[in-house]
Image (cartoon, rainbow, N blue to C red):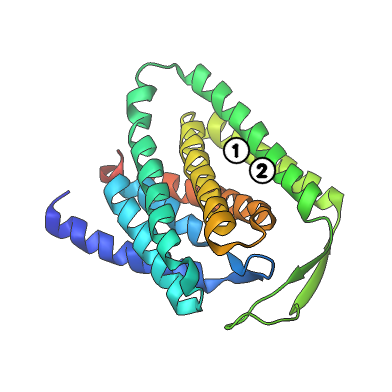
Amino acid sequence: MKNTIRLGVTSIFTALVCVATISFTVYVPSTRGFFNIGETMVYVTALLFGPLVGGFAGGVGSMFADILLGYYYYAPATLVIKASEGIIVGFLGRKKSLLSAVHTKREWKGFTLLIGVLVGALVSLIGFLYYTGAVEFYSGIPPPENPTSTVFLSMEVWLGLGIFVALLIGAIGFISEPEFGFMLVATVLGGLLMVSGYFIYEQFVLGVLAAAEVPVNVGQMTVGMIIATPIVRIVQRSLPQLRQ
């Protein structure tokens, strides 16, 4: 990619990361943080354009979103954590084509199916443990003291969602692209770095109940992964020149 094109792409996707992050937020009172869907655009950027663009757009775009939303005390950590996440996902995404050459389609299909089962189980487990029952949502700028809405989520909802996610990933692996599982692994590893980074920052710098946001960040990672990976697959099929 030429430097001028890379600069343009980086600028555009940095803005898109920022917009995606501020487009939907849910306040978490115990940590003074928030749930958002910015991970989706971080993953899309990193998987399409690699670690450099993914790292810059993820870190800078997310940092500006924190500042615009009033969560300025998270901005320094977000710059480092989201940049690292974008770099990891982008780096691993580029290794997919190399690994594809040394493994058969049957092996990739089995691997993708296993990842689908694990991700589905993760969605159900997080839902069972932290989001079953009456779930309160906080939204607004600045964050309100009282919940803006309350939704009841049963265990059956999370079980059904987990099964759906597992079947969806498995179907994509068998019908469309066996290597889809490796793309998921890249986003999971990047997401776990994000979860760990915020836990350390909240625990030792902000001094808040960091454990309360772990399930929120895991959910953020999972939503981002489920939305981003099919988008990347569609874009790469439509624009083969973006394939890594």
Q: Residue 203 in the image: x percent, y percent?
A: 59, 55
Locate the C terminus and report the quarter of the image it occupies: top left
Q: Is residue 130 left or right of residue 117?
A: right
Q: Residue 189 in the image: x percent, y percent?
A: 49, 39
Q: Is residue 199 shown to the viewer in this render?
A: yes
Q: Residue 173 in the image: x percent, y percent?
A: 54, 32
The residue beneath circle 1 is 169
Q: Is residue 188 above or below residue 150?
A: above
Q: Is residue 158 above or below residue 25?
A: above
Residue at point 27% right, 60% down? 10
Secondary element type, mark 2: helix
Q: Quadrant of residue 148?
A: bottom right
Secondary element type, mark 1: helix
Tell me whether the residue at label 2 lies in contact with that at label 1, contact meaning CB atoms closer than 8 angstroms: yes
Q: Quadrant of residue 30?
A: bottom right
Residue at point 17% right, 58% down? 5
Residue at point 75% right, 77% down? 147
Q: Is residue 40 left or right of residue 130?
A: left
Q: Which amino acid, by three-letter code, is at mark 2? A: Val
> Foreground: 232 or 21?
21
Residue at point 64% right, 52% down? 214
Q: Is residue 205 left or right of residue 11?
A: right
Q: Which amino acid, by three-letter code, is at mark 1? A: Ile
| Badge 1: residue crowd in 10 Å (few <14, some 14–19, many ≥20) | many
| Badge 2: residue crowd in 10 Å (few <14, some 14–19, many ≥20) | many
Q: CA distance from mark 2 to mark 1?
A: 6 Å
The residue beneath circle 2 is 165
Q: Is residue 36 shown to the viewer in this render?
A: no
Q: Residue 76 in the image: x percent, y percent?
A: 41, 64
